[in-house]
């Protein structure tokens, strides 16, 4: 091990924040939005899915920028972004389909 690496903590804070942030993001995305999509699919499925598509577009911009900024880890960044996008789109698609097939009333009153 090189002497310059002994005790080096460069990047540890950022890695910590990224790990914590992704946990919050995944929990928030899974608990609220797909659930809302399923519960209120009869009245809001199209508008909710519009925002999913816009979010995927925004995500692609950020993932692309991250790949440009960190070319060393571009493959990993791209893989993570593609996996997360695919999983979230699958969750929303399932929620929409389940909600539209359900006979249960939504939670919103119009």
Image: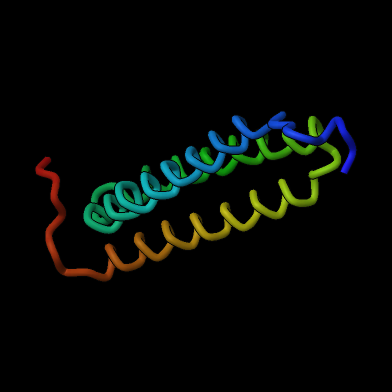
Colour mode?
rainbow
Left or right for 53, reference 99: right
- Residue 70, quarter of picture: top right
Q: Position of residue 41 (x, y in %)?
A: 28, 55
Residue closer to the observer: 66 or 20 = 20
Where in the figure is residue 57, as x and y percent of width and height?
60, 39
Left or right of 61: which side holds 32? left
Question: Could you tell me which residue is drawn at 43 percent across and 60 percent down?
Answer: 91
Q: In the depicted view, which residue is nearer to us: 34 or 50? A: 34
Query: Residue 82 falls in which quadrant of the image?
Result: bottom right
Q: Residue at x 30, y 47 (%)?
A: 32
Q: As rendered, which of 10 and 59 lies closer to the eye?
A: 10
Tell me: 52 left or right of 77. Answer: left
Quarter placement of the N terminus: top right
- Left or right: residue 29 compared with residue 55: left
Depicted 71 relative to depicted 97: above or below? above
Which residue: 48% across, 40% down? 20
Q: Say whether residue 65 is visible.
A: no
Quarter of the C terminus within the rendering:
top left
Say whether residue 45 is visible: yes
């Amino acid at each position: 091990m090189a002497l310059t690496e002994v005790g080096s903590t460069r990047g540890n804070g950022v890695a910590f924040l990224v790990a914590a942030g992704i946990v919050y993001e995944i929990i928030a995305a899974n608990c609220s939005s797909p659930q809302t999509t399923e519960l209120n699919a009869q009245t809001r499925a199209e508008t909710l899915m519009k925002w999913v598509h816009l979010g995927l577009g925004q995500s692609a911009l950020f993932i692309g920028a991250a790949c440009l900024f960190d070319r060393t880890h571009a493959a990993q960044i791209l893989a993570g972004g593609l996996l997360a996008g695919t999983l979230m789109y699958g969750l929303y698609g399932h929620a929409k389909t389940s909600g539209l097939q359900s006979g249960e009333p939504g939670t919103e009153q119009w």
